[in-house]
Amino acid sequence: MLPRLLLACCAVAALGAQTPRKIFPYPYSQADLPNGLRLVTVPADYPNIVAAFIVVSTGSRNEVESGHTGFAHLFEHLMFKGTEKFPQAKYDEAMKRIGADSNAFTTRDYTCYHTTFSKEDLATVLMMEADRFQNLKYTESDFKTETLAVLGEYNKNSSSPFSKLNEVLADTAFDRHTYKHTTMGLLKDIQDMPNQYDYSLKFFDRYYRPEYTTILVVGDVKAGPTRDLVEKYWGAWKRGSYQPQIPAEPPQEAPRTAHVDWPSETLPILTIAFKAPAYSDDAKDTAALDALAFLAFSENSDLYQKLVLQEQKVDLLDASSPTNVDPALFEITARVKKAADIDYVRGRILETVKAFQEKPVDAARLDAVRKHLRYDVALEMDNSETIARILAEYVALRRTPETMNRLYAQYARLTPEDVQQAAAKYLSEKAWTIVTLTGPGGAQ
Amino acid sequence: MRFLLSLLLLVHPAAAQIRVLAHPGKSPLVTFRIVFTTGSAAEPRAQAGLAYLTARMLAEGGTREMTYQQIVDAMFPMAASVSAQVDKEMCTFAGATHIDNLPEYYKLLRAMLLDPGWREDDFQRVRDDAVNAIKVGLRSNDEELGKEVLYQNIFEATPYGHYSGGTVSSLEKLTLDDVKQFYRTHYSQSHLILGIAGGYPDGFVESMKKDFRKLPPGAGFRPRMAPPPLIDATRVAIVEKDTRSVAFSIGFPIVVTRASPDYAALLVATSYLGQHRMSGGVLYDRMREMRGLNYGDYAYIEYFPRGMFLMEPPPNLARHFQIFQLWIRPVEPPAAKFALRLALHELDQFIQNGIPQDGFERTRDFLGKYVNVLTRTKGAELGYIIDSMYYGTANYVPSLKAALARLTRDEVNRVIKRYLRVDRLVIAAVSKDGEELKRQLASDDPSPMTYNSPKAAEILEEDKIVEKRPLHLRPEDIKVVPAEQVFQ
């Protein structure tokens, strides 16, 4: 007997209400197979279409051995190489016939394989996905060729200055943790990938296991029959035993800086990043830092209105607070119109951080952020695929949609003092890494 | 009662002029898609970017009563916004709100489109952003840059011949008065299609229509559309910049649009050759999967901007003139010439051999279902119907499904022969060391390919043909332009 959990609430709840209902409006069921695989089924209001998102809790964070960065992402490619039963051409052909939109993406913490299709094809999709997760087969020659497609992906990304900036930021801010490299991996490791066939087999054997995997099925479906199909096709998958030893990042003791000289025309870019804690919905830190990012740096913040709208010295200003498995970076990024203004903009950003550390924010503004967060989710959840995509992020962290409800419950409980305390605790000078990027003739 | 209607389509172009597409439903969200059937084709070439700046001023500027700052403040708690998209023949404003906030959101939206503030500081910011979108946005994205250069080259000297985002020099010359003038002339009831979907209350659509009657009726001004000039011989535009790899876009004009009876057949042919960012297309299989040349290779018969960020094309880019296009994603420089030859070889083979029966059936079935995926959001559903209204065709989804159901393999093979070709092309490349690439392309020297793994005999045999494929290019057919001068 599989445990089942049913939660229900109303999809049209007034989201601005003072005591809001749970943020995730759909009833869902959650079931664990004996092998460790978890299934989450969400019957949604949107007819005919089903989205299946398979979340593997393996991302570039899991790339613990030197010389092998980029392997989680490489698997995003290799997983389309086929099996004995469904060689690649046959897999592609079957997906085409059912008109499925099938793709994958990789992050620092997880890899997600997703397919959107018509409801009558649910059994076919679950059967084919189960086959490739359990029986993936590729030759060394196929492997070598696919690594070149990954190099092609690196190449096409590399025309953006933000790609380089992110590489340098990660490398500067981290010493030991695997967040030191980007999900794409280091260029030298990508160039060496063709020689790493055996390592790829090891990587698959370690991480493509049921205990790392959660299947999300969202849309025009019913929980019971979906569970039966998953048991039928995925029940025989063998549990693994590998646990990666991910090095802990030592506390940062002093501020860090780096600079990138970009060879082509660009506006200068300034990123100020602070070490922030791992995702948590037990404590308020994650919610408080996220609220801070909105309060201090979003479109309606005083700083945005000053730098972007009034003085017009900056054309992009953005901040993001991390929701990662391990401690990651709270990043503030500004694109500055003139190199001569970089110091000025840096000064204003740091001044803003200081102001939030010294004084609690106006409670009405915090309420506006809460409303924004709730309406933002409600507006995005306008189709089954997006519902699944949003849930995948939470499922990657705690393997349950309840994660989302728990985080939003923390937002609801936040006080202005919580935000002030989080700013004081995490956004300190010794925890910052500042990276600048300028184009030709844009030296500081 | 209202919910019983799955689709209410009110079109009264003669009487009220404003066309309305209303799609009521039970959703707690209300989606707006407001299209003006005017765009950059209506602006003089010397004022390139005028339609773009006008739309941006509406979506990112203040109203008469509120500054942009106040609008942003008001929108923020609702997590709402108004986005603008500008193309040759359409300017589209899109937004959505939760039903809780409908009155407040609509009040802002209405003021933004009907009662703009035209402040000089908004104009300075919006124009700066437009200049930077070219200098550091487009020019930092080799693939998008190559595609826009391709379009500009093909449509040169026609109303489509300039980039909708303008050029740096034209933008710098435009004034707020130019923008106001464009708005007064082109934002008229006769150009307007109002799209709305979701759980809005009874009477909402009528009151919205009444509000938009504030716009001038409009004389139905349309720019004189001109087809692109004929291409005598294949020519190449190389955009030179410091970059790791070589991106190619290849194309030529076609007369087929959604209004053409051959649309469905050519769509099947193109999808089989290279469905956007999906595996299994001929180009993808033979260039990426078998040879590892790059990240992907696709084919198109409609304009599809920002394809590197999007899985599906945005609606409301309807055009009278389209091109057939191959998108060859960045290739390592030593393999660039071979990749170009291979792309042309595969296109050539496709034209000669046509689509096989199983490929035809598979692609037809795929498109028949994939069209549901394309229209899965309310915004996209409205957008596709609005496009159909503009083209004067039946609703896209059911009419494409019906056309696919009637289609035969022979029909597809007929349109392949009729519309596709491998000569008289325009090729756009973005590359480091443009003169070296020009030297290579202007010579018929072989460009043998080497691999890091053993290849099937069939591949190696084909390579022997591909590496010698004549490109028929003379040095005078190839021009090299520094990236800084493109759209300058």
Image (cartoon, coloured by chain):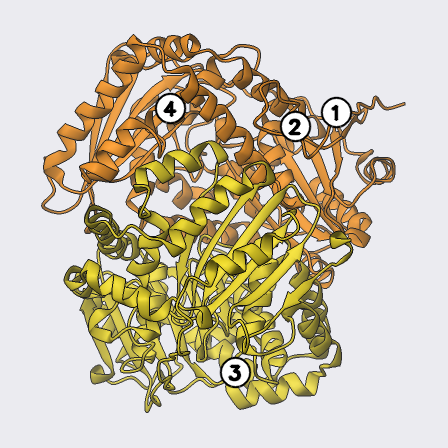
Host chain of mark 1:
A
Check if mark 3 and mark 2 are on a common chain: no
Check if mark 4 and mark 2 are on a common chain: yes
Which chain is assigned orange? A
Q: Earlier in the sequence, mark 1 or mark 4?
A: 1
- In the displayed structure image, the side of residue A36 where residue A289 appears, left or right: left
- In the displayed structure image, the side of residue B152 where residue A284 appears, left or right: right
> Quadrant location of the C terminus of chain B?
bottom left
Q: Earlier in the sequence, mark 2 or mark 1?
A: 1
Element on which disc 4 rests: helix
Which chain is assigned yellow? B
Q: Do the numbered discs 1 and 4 sit on residues whose CB atoms are within 8 Å?
A: no
**Image quadrant of residue A31?**
top right
Q: Would you name the residue on which mark 2 appears? A: A212
Check if mark 1 and mark 3 are on a common chain: no
Q: Would you name the residue on which mark 3 appears? A: B256
Label 3 – label 2 distance at C-alpha: 49 Å
Q: Would you name the residue on which mark 1 appears? A: A36
Pinpoint residue B272: horizontal percent, then vertical percent: 61, 71
Task: For marks 3 and 2, give the one nearer the viewer.
Answer: 3
Q: Would you name the residue on which mark 4 appears? A: A295
Q: Which residue type does callout 2 highlight?
A: Tyr
Q: Which residue type does callout 1 highlight?
A: Gly
Q: Do the numbered discs 1 and 3 sit on residues whose CB atoms are within 8 Å?
A: no
Label 1 – label 4 distance at C-alpha: 41 Å
- In the displayed structure image, the side of residue B201 where residue A353 appears, left or right: left
Q: Which residue type does callout 3 highlight?
A: Val
Q: Which residue type does callout 4 highlight?
A: Leu
Check if mark 1 and mark 4 are on a common chain: yes
Label 4 – label 2 distance at C-alpha: 36 Å
